[in-house]
Image (tube, rainbow, N blue to C red):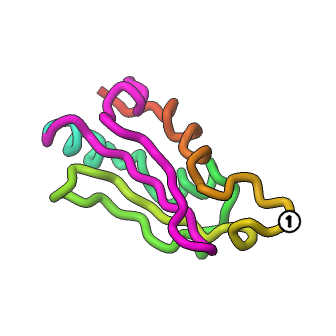
Amino acid sequence: MTALKDLAQVIRSKNSGPFEITFDVMFKDADTYRRVEQSGVLNHELVCRLYGVRREDIVALLFFKPAQAFKFTLKRAGAQGSINERDTFGAQQHAPLMTIDIPN
């Protein structure tokens, strides 16, 4: 097993408007991208478990071959900047992805 952080060139989250946060995992090369995609580890069930969301809170979840990336977008629990909102820029939400294990 290899941690996702050791396979990806970039793992980030960012604001995607006042009601969504988007996540990007970009891979170093085509072989690594294929390895992660074919593992089946990065899926709706994983995202729901990691982020405590329902499947219907996932706006998009896909592998995007032209960018050698895995991407997903989540609905925010509340509007950007609202009371109890923890991360206005959405830039602190990607950490749970870093330790996901991908089979060798």
Q: Which residues are magenta?
A: 1-30
**Quadrant in which the N terminus is drawn:** top left
- Vertical side of 12 occupied by 85: above or below: below
Residue 75 placement, left or right of 31: right
Residue 43 counted in the magenta span: no
Front-most of 47 and 25? 25
User: What residue lies at 54% left-to-right and 44% top-to-bottom?
Assistant: 94
User: Callout 1: 10 Å neighbours few (<14), some, many (20+)?
Assistant: few
Q: Amino acid at mark 1?
A: Ile
Asked if residue 23 is among those painted magenta in the image, a careful observer would answer yes
Residue in view at x 44 percent, y 56 percent: 43
**Split into 4 quadrants, where in the image is the C terminus?**
top left
Q: Position of residue 70 (x, y in %)?
A: 34, 53
Give above or below for 6 relative to 26. Answer: above
Tag count: 1
The residue drawn where x is 79% and y is 69% is 82
Front residue of 76 and 14: 14
Horizontal and vertical percent for residue 19? 62, 74
Q: Majority secondary structure of the magenta segment? A: strand
